Amino acid sequence: MVTRRKFLGRLAIGAALTATWRPSSRSMALAADAKPLFQISLAEWSLHRSIFGGKVKHLDFAKVAKQEFGLDGVEYVNQFFKDKAKDAKYLAEMNQRCADLGVKSLLIMIDGEGKLGDADEAKRRQAVENHHKWAEAAKTLGCHSIRVNAASDGTYEEQLGRAADGLRSLSEFAAKLQLNVIVENHGGLSSNGKWLAGVMKKVDLPNCGTLPDFGNFHDYDRYLGVTETMPFAKAVSAKSHDFDEQGNETKTDYLKMMKIVVEAGYHGYVGIEYEGRKLEEMDGIRATLKLLERVRMQLGKA
């Protein structure tokens, strides 16, 4: 894997061998220490068929990410360890496996715990409480965030207010754990970039943000949606489905999309989330990784 860091290092070495000018040890050190434009992680949903089918175990997810793809950041999905949120022994095993491999646990994607913007206030409060155990589990695992949904009911404005109310309550709890609560565009009005940005502004808490997903915008312009939600982003999801003969994703212009991400000032982890069916999951992940590395190189030269 040729990262931007390795590329810069090779340029420095090549210059030293072919030119009469030799760079100082300090300049070479700076080139060697240059950080990549963005980092790449693996979202566990990329392997959902393999995990549900018993081909890959949840506890082996970190090993797959590191040994198969050379990635050091993982993003969990709560569906794959649904009954383990309060299992201290199980969480300790997850931590140990990551530590042994040098892999970072970045976040937990949470589904199935109720609507944080439910029109019924009692149900909304219950949904918030249902997420507490996952926030505590994320803290135990060393994650920086929990990814939640902003599902709601009612008019545009009613849903904005209700989602903001639930998210604010959960974010206040998460703040005590030094944890972020981040929302993905994941159906309903959350797939409307303007609406989701409005929710963020209404919550107005530093630990409440977004996880822009390249897909999941449906009829909404995906480039506009990512542009609108990037100011609040604390993670990014590189959704992929199919690829053409040149290795480009057929639904999303990755160069255009990642330029939006980088120009927003984001240089953190971009999570691979392969959802296609034409390629096997492992091959789809590799194709997405290769594309992200190529785009990172192109943007690094710009």
Image (cartoon, rainbow, N blue to C red):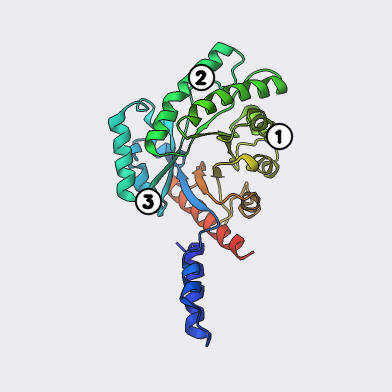
Instruction: Specify which label sits upstream in the sequence, 2 or 3.
Output: 3
Instruction: Specify which label sits upstream in the sequence, 1 or 3.
Output: 3
Distance of label 1 from label 2 (alpha carbons) = 24 Å
Residue type at numbered disc 1:
Lys
Residue at 47% over, 48% down: 41
Side of 182 relative to 195 (left or right)? left
Residue at 60% over, 34% down: 185
Side of 214 relative to 74 (left or right)? right
Distance of label 1 from label 3 (alpha carbons) = 36 Å
Q: Where is residue 172 in the image (x, y as percent from the top left)?
A: 53, 26
Residue type at numbered disc 3:
Lys
Q: Where is residue 276 in the image (x, y as percent from the top left)?
A: 52, 43
Q: What element carries label 1?
A: helix
Q: With respect to residue 81, does 23 lie above or below?
A: below
According to the picture, the residue beneath numbered tag 2 turns out to be 127
Q: What element carries label 2?
A: helix
Residue 246 shows up from this direction: no
Residue type at numbered disc 2:
Ala
Q: Residue 194: give its label.
A: 1
Q: Nearer the viewer, residue 129 or 279?
A: 129
Q: Residue 66: give its label.
A: 3
